[in-house]
Image (spheres, rainbow, N blue to C red):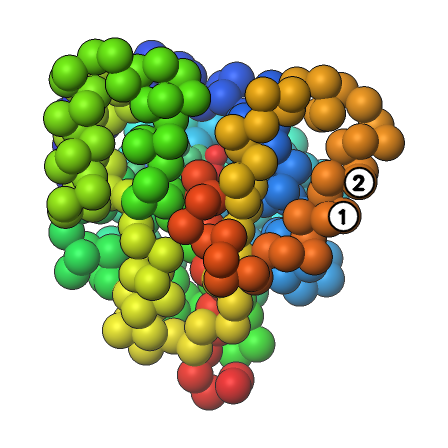
Amino acid sequence: MLRPDVLDYYNRGGERTRLAAGTGLLEYLRTWDILERALPAAPADILDVGGATGVYAAPLAAAGHRVHVVDPVPDHVAAAGALPGVTAAVGDARALDVADASVDAVLLFGPLYHLTDRADRVLAWAEARRVLRPGGVVLGATIGRFASLFDGFVKGYAADPLFVGLVRDVLATGVHGGGPYFTTAYFHHPDEPAAEARDAGLAVRRVVCVESALWMAGRLPEVLASPDQRALMLELLRGIEEEPAMLGTSSHLITVAGLLSDS
Ligand SMILES: C[S@@+](CC[C@H](N)C(=O)[O-])C[C@H]1O[C@@H](n2cnc3c(N)ncnc32)[C@H](O)[C@@H]1O
């Protein structure tokens, strides 16, 4: 079951607009760039676990894929299920109501950073493996261990002792306590996502930065508003997305994995 504070947070409706501007838009553009290169050609069967209101499901369906969203928040499921070409159901990444070996791709863009127990995260990866067809791909998004530390000074939250306490806890344990700042979450050290996926019996292909350090760029809105600058930034970020020195600076990482039998 979803923790009540996580449900309360998502019931406020923020997922409808979160990725529309600023750092959210950078996250969206980079995630889409990574997705497009990792997914099989359309039409593929894509399971979007933690798909929320369908921010990726909508363009994936428009690109010709068959997309099913699974999310524990009923409002998210209602919004995603109303999108053209998208089906949706209430569910949990740890126990998917989906047949073995029945999809070409699984997106875990949400569950891995809301499951605070490692065993639960490994279970989510293992469920993704179970439902994957041979040749398929799993993509898991995680939030970086150091993101709240950086955010504290970029956005000024570090003036609040409550926030500083949350950062200290994250640096010590990975668990973000939430409260007025986001909600209960787990912020991964860069070494952790691949180890979790491997423990679930998956073969890890790549771990990539979504934003790298550029989510902290003060001029980000101007860069994203300029088509030439935006294209240049996306091209250059693609070139360094696997650079190990960048992984710890990124607000999000995506881990790309497949079946051991395919590797
Ligand atoms: C920040 S939103 C991400 C939405 C979208 N996938 C994206 O990447 O922008 C996190 C989502 O994960 C969902 N979630 C949290 N715990 C989950 C779980 N155990 N199983 C499946 N989804 C979960 C939440 O309900 C929420 O919709």
The residue drawn where x is 33% and y is 63% is 191
Where is mark 2, residue-wise?
A: 232
On screen, residue 227 versus residue 80, left or right, reads right
User: Badge 1 local density, few (<14 within 10 Å), some, or many (20+)?
Assistant: few
Q: Amino acid at mark 1?
A: Glu
* Residue 254 placement (x, y as % from top left): 48, 53
Percent across and percent down for residue 43 are 70, 57
Comparing 148 with 77, the one in front is: 148
Does the CB distance between marks 1 and 2 fall below 8 Å? yes
Q: CA distance from mark 1 to mark 2?
A: 5 Å
Q: Residue furthest right?
A: 228
> Which residue was labeled with disc 1?
235
Q: In the rendered image, is residue 254 in sight?
A: no
Q: Residue at x 51, y 29 (%)?
A: 216
On the rendering, which quadrant does ligand 1 occupy? top left
Q: Amino acid at mark 2?
A: Leu
